[in-house]
Every structure is written in C-alpha cells, then in structure tokens.
Amino acid sequence: MMQVVLPSHSALQYMGRIDRNNPDAPAFYWAGSMVRFGFYGKQLCVTLTDYRAYGDPVIGYILDGVEGKLTLSKDTNIPQTVWIPVESDGAHECILFKRQDATHYFVLNEISLAENGAVFSLPALPQRRIECYGDSVSAGAVCEAYDYTGKTDPPVYDAALDNAWHSYAMQTARLLGAQIHLTAQGGIALLDNTGYFEYGKIGMETAYHQMAYVPFAPASEWDFSRYTPDVVLFAIGQNDHHVGEKDNCIPDDKKKEVWLQTYCSLIRDLMQKYPKATFVLLLTILMHDPFWDGLLDEACALLNSPRVKRFRFHRCGVGTPGHPRIQEQCEMACELTEYLLSFGEPLWNH
C-alpha cells in the first residue's frame, strides 16, 4: 500500500504561473513551472492528467541533483501514473518541472511514496525573484539538439528536445540564487496577429496577463499579486518580423510606432504592478535583423526610467542561425548573470 500525498500538502513548494484554484489539481501551463518537495523512502511516482496539443510530451525532474525525464503516454485527458526511479532509501529531494511550452499542459493529481514514506519540508524558496517574458529561446526550445550547436535546427525534430530547465533565464536564476517565473512561449511576438504562435493569432500583449494562455485550456487571468519580481527580463522582438504568410517584414513608420507604443504600454503596466522592479530589455543570440535591436533601444529611450535597462549579449543577433543549444544558453546565462551582479545587492533589497 503506497503512501498518497495530495498536491495541497503544505510540504510541496510551487514556482511558476500555476493554476492552483483547485489546490488538489494544480495545472502547469508555462514552461519551467515546477513543484519541489523532500521525501523519505525508495519509491516515488506521480499521477497526472496530460492535455496535449502536439508532439511527445516529456516531464522533467531533478532527483537529488540528478536530472531525468519522463515520457508520457499518448493518452490524453485521462490520469496516468509515471515512476521516478529511486535507487536508495532515506531522504531525497525532488523537483518536477514542465520542460515544454504550449506542446501540452498537465494537471498534477497526486504523488505516491513507499508505504513507510513521507514528504517533508525543504528550505524555503529563495527570496530573490526574477520574471522572464520571452519566446522559444527563453523557453529552452530545441536546446537538447546537441549536434546542431551553432547550426540551423534539425530538419525534423520533436518538442522532446525542448528543456526549459536549461534556458538562459532559468540558468541565470539558479546562478543568482533566485526564483523565476518563466512567461515564455515559442513563436510568440509582441502584437496579436504577428509572429508564429497559434499561427500568429496570440501575441504577448494578450498572453502576458494570462495564467492559462493556450487555446486548448480554459482561459484564466493571472493574479499579479501572487508573485512580485525584483527583476523582469523582457526578451520579445525575435518573431515580430512574421506577419500573416510574410516573413522578414520590417514595419513601415506607422506600424513601427504602433509596435513601440504597445511595447512601452506593456512595460509601463508591469512597472505599475511591480513598482520596485528593475526591467531589462533584451534579445538573444539567435540571428535576427538588427532593426529589432534598434527598436529596443528606442523603447528604452521612450520609457526614460532608471528602472529600465537595456542589455545586449556579446553575440546578440549573430550567435547562431538555429535555436541556442545548452552550451549557448549557458553562454547567455553567464553574461546576463555577470550583468545583473554588477548592480549589487540594491537590485534585490527593496
């Protein structure tokens, strides 16, 4: 007889935009969302219900510091149980996290331990807090295509190569000893009806305030009071060159003005929600037209606030023609960490 632990147990720690309106059925939508807990015993399995849009969903876990993954069955909308291998008895620490973005979402139903097992509370999550708004690079898309480092993406690949844990944003958070909410989605642009996400229908202007943002889930608003970051990374602009069926579009003066005003309005709204946070505007090393870096420079000037910073990676826009792999994500994380460290403790001590 296994020991069943419900998701509402007080020893479980959650991080990310997770729908916990039903405490015993939390829904994980955004890449990088996670649950963390300690447990005793030599058995561990989780029961969850997966809702898949496409591809082969894979759940990530960290057990006693060692990363692994669980490939889910192709059955959707019904509970399934997956086992995490535990090699020894005694005390353990586990993190269960969502590797992929809108490929799927899942609801955690229960955690099961050995008959003599039990969960226990781990040290509290870090006080430092980061939030990252971004696209596929920020979400860690295709970062496990190791043989394609510095190259275009494989001609055929599955979302199982995505891993938000190794995105530059999540690596940066770990290097700095910070929590992170990863509000990132592959293909997304700033404006609705641009970019690639959901055939360009949904932009960050719609998704940024959503908890459930995928079209195959019940729409729900995020309560910004649940998480107040010290640092907000805003990495949007990579996919904005795609409009309708057209690629590599540079906006005319009128459309450029709309883009800038929307970008600044969104940042100002977040600045009101997070009145003490520092905002960092950036794009990644994935190749893109320098026009978009220029737009971010203009946006930073228009916002004209000491709380808004402009950061460029050394290889911004020229580093790789394909999604950054883990090594390249690490390169970005190290640069960004060094930059944020340069502000010292006042960045975090508000």
Image: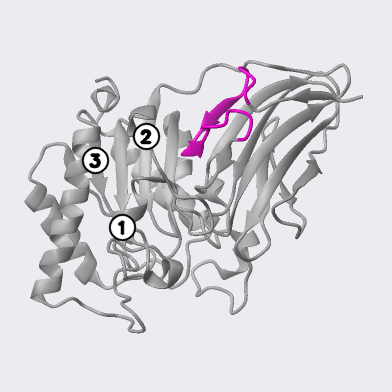
Residue 317 lies left or right of residue 65; in this view the side is left
Q: Main secondary structure of the magenta part?
A: loop
User: Whole-Å distance between the Cαs marked 2 and 1?
Assistant: 22 Å
* Residue designated by label 1: 236
SS at mark 1?
loop
SS at mark 3?
helix
Q: Report the residue at 52% width, 44% height from top.
A: 32
Question: Residue 140: where, in percent of width, then height?
Answer: 51, 55
Query: Can residue 264 be found in the magenta stretch?
Result: no
> Which callout, 3 or 1, points to the residue nearer the camera?
3
What's the mark number on residue 270? 3
Residue nearer the viewer, 61 or 328: 61
Residue nearer the viewer, 17 or 330: 17
Question: Residue 317: where, in percent of width, then height?
Answer: 32, 66
Query: Relative to 203, does residue 255 appear above or below in the rendering?
Result: below
Which image quadrant: the C terminus?
A: top left
Magenta segment: 8-25
Within the image, what quadrant is residue 76 found in?
A: bottom right
Query: Can residue 19 be found in the magenta stretch?
Result: yes
